[in-house]
Image (cartoon, rainbow, N blue to C red):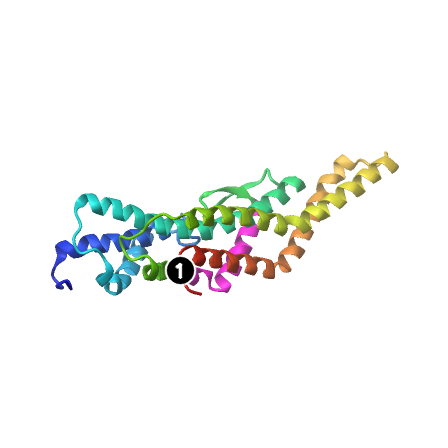
Amino acid sequence: MPWAIFDIQFMLPAFAIVLFRVGGLTLTAPLISSSAHPPQLKVAFSFIVSCMIFPVVLRTAPTFLTIGSVIVVVFGELLIGLIIGTTVSVMFSGAELAGTMIGQQAGLALGQVVNPMLDEESSIIGQVYFLVMLMVFLAIGGHRSTVAALLDTYQTIPPGSFRLSESMVTLLEDVLRSAFIFGMRLSAPALTALFIASLVMAFMSRTMPQLNILTVGFAIRAFVALAAAALSMSLSYDLIHDEIVNVFEALRSAFGLGG
């Protein structure tokens, strides 16, 4: 039976269901979940998006809900948003992993800075890689695709009908594996350059003992790392673009969404 516009006692639980799905995304999605944004802004974003979605999904939302059933349903709705946001955020961890490995090999990992996007400390080079990843993500509309993926889930998973499936668990496993491989590929040019620099300095220390490699070695490794990282990042657009596209394809496949 269609709801009357003033059936507030029925509409509030249904609105809470929609709000929790959007809220799960707000808690974990890159850029949106950043601690640099005040909590009031995040709440306002979730509320506004939910108000926009609610009239569209009103007919598919459960009509009568008890307090106990609402708790169970909103947990499932929250989990949908958390899975989508976490899936997209993991690839940013892969980019930061690449920078962290380079920083450790170059001896630059002692300098730690706060990454407000992840609300944690990271190496300087790791944050540079993170920001490059974020710029490509925004340039190709990844933030819009993230919200669009959440909205499309209402077509395949109506409010209150979520069931955790094997495909969603496999999704997180595949994304973690993909992020690690992505980080290794992204850092490979700089790590290779550092390895070659280490071999050259080792050879020089054996052939010219009077040269104090310990004195100049740190500066050489730092220069090689920064130069190789700058060159590789300028040529890594296709790699980053493909990783973002693959993550969204895996996400949409796990939720049974269209292309």
* Identity of the residue drawn at 46% across and 61% down: 142
Q: Position of residue 5 (x, y in %)?
A: 14, 64
Residue projecting furthest to the right: 207
Prevalent SS, magenta region: helix
Front residue of 251/105: it is: 251
* Identity of the residue drawn at 50% across and 64% down: 140
Does residue 29 show up magenta in the picture? no
Front residue of 87/174: it is: 174
Does residue 137 show up magenta in the picture? yes
Where's the N terminus, which quadrant? bottom left
Please provide the residue range marked out in magenta. Answer: 124-148
Say what secondary structure mark 1 lies in: helix
Residue 75 seen anywhere in this rendered image of the structure:
yes
* Identity of the residue drawn at 32% across and 54% down: 22
Using residue 257 as the reference point, say whether residue 12 is left or right of it. Answer: left
* Identity of the residue drawn at 35% across and 51% down: 80
Q: Position of residue 216 (x, y in %)?
A: 75, 40
| Residue on which the image places disc 1 | 149
